[in-house]
Structures are given as C-alpha cells and as structure tokens.
C-alpha cells in the first residue's frame, strides 16, 4: 500500500523543478508527510513553513473575514479558503485543502522554472490518492 510520504515523494520526482511536497494538519500545524530534495529544508524550516500555511488557511484574520462574510450573507460560518498559490522571489507554492479532509492541506513547492499548470495538475491529481490515507 502506498503511503502519504510516498505520494509526496512521487510528486517531487515527477514535477519538473519541484523542491518539496508535504501534507499539513491545519488544526495542529504538524507535518503529516513530507518529501523534498533541498538540503536546507531542515525540520525547523519545514515546521515554520507549515505554520505559515496554517495561518493562510486558518489564521485569525482569515477567521475574522469568514465570520464577516457569513454575517453579511446571513449564513453559517464556514472555512472558505480552499486553494492558494503563492509566489516568492524564487519559488511557487501550490496549496490545497484535501477534499473530504478539511483539516488537511497538501503543499507543493517548486522553483520558478516549473510550469504552473503542471504544478496544479500534479497537486490536484494527488489529492484523491491521499484523502483515504489521512485521519
């Protein structure tokens, strides 16, 4: 049986200019799986990136905006952010909540030589593979 770490490793190996892939628990900020090929991706570095991803999806300001939207619409408060693409000086970050596992986030980090469409395609095709393996 394939593990979530192996799925992350496959993405890193299959996507041109991929640097790393991970699955983050959005409640605790813990890394559930990770694969990378970058020497400076130490555990403390990976933990900091995971914490930043949690802030983007479940942070205080995001929660405040979600409450405001629910209030204006007269609906129940929901977690609205599903996907985020972030660009830094040298990297692309693709992030998506795992369908059916709303407290799990899958992340792919690539260099800027990567094709954006391929990054999203790789991430989205992995989501249904990891979902049944997550708590």
Image: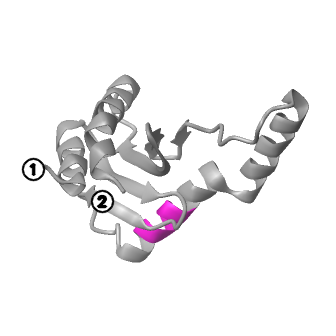
Where is mark 1, residue-wise?
A: 1
Residue 11, given in percent of the width and then of the height, sits at 23, 42
Whether residue 122 is situated above or below residue 65 in the rendered picture:
above
Q: Residue furthest bottom?
A: 44
Give whichever of 53, 99 is nearer the camera. Answer: 99
Q: Position of residue 72 (x, y in %)?
A: 90, 32
Select label 2 or label 1 by which is in front.
1
| Residue 99, numbered label | none
Which element carries disc 1, helix, strand or loop?
loop
The span shown in magenta is 46-51
Q: Position of residue 82 (x, y in %)?
A: 56, 37
The local crowd at label 1, few if under 14, some if 14 to 19, many if 20 or more residues have their Cα within 10 Å, is few
Q: Nearer the viewer, residue 112 or 18?
A: 18
Q: Residues within 10 Å of mark 2 (few under 14, many from 20)?
A: many
> Magenta includes 109?
no
Instruction: Depth check: give the residue in front, 11 or 57.
Output: 57
Mainly helix, strand or loop, the magenta region?
helix
Farthest residue in the left direction? 1
Vertical arrangement, residue 19 with respect to residue 113, above or below: below
Image quadrant in which you'd find residue 51: bottom right
């Amino acid at each position: 049986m394939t593990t979530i770490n192996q799925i992350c490793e496959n993405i890193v190996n299959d996507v041109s200019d991929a640097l790393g892939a991970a699955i983050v628990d959005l409640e605790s900020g813990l890394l559930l799986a990770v694969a990378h090929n970058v020497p400076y991706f130490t555990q403390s570095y990976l933990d900091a990136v995971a914490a930043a991803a949690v802030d983007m999806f479940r942070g205080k300001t995001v929660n405040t905006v979600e409450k405001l939207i629910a209030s204006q619409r007269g609906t129940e408060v929901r977690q609205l952010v599903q996907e985020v693409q972030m660009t830094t000086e040298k990297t692309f970050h693709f992030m998506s909540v795992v369908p059916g596992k709303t407290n799990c986030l899958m992340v792919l980090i690539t260099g800027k030589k990567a094709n954006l469409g391929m990054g999203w395609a790789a991430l989205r095709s992995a989501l249904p593979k990891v979902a049944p393996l997550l708590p």
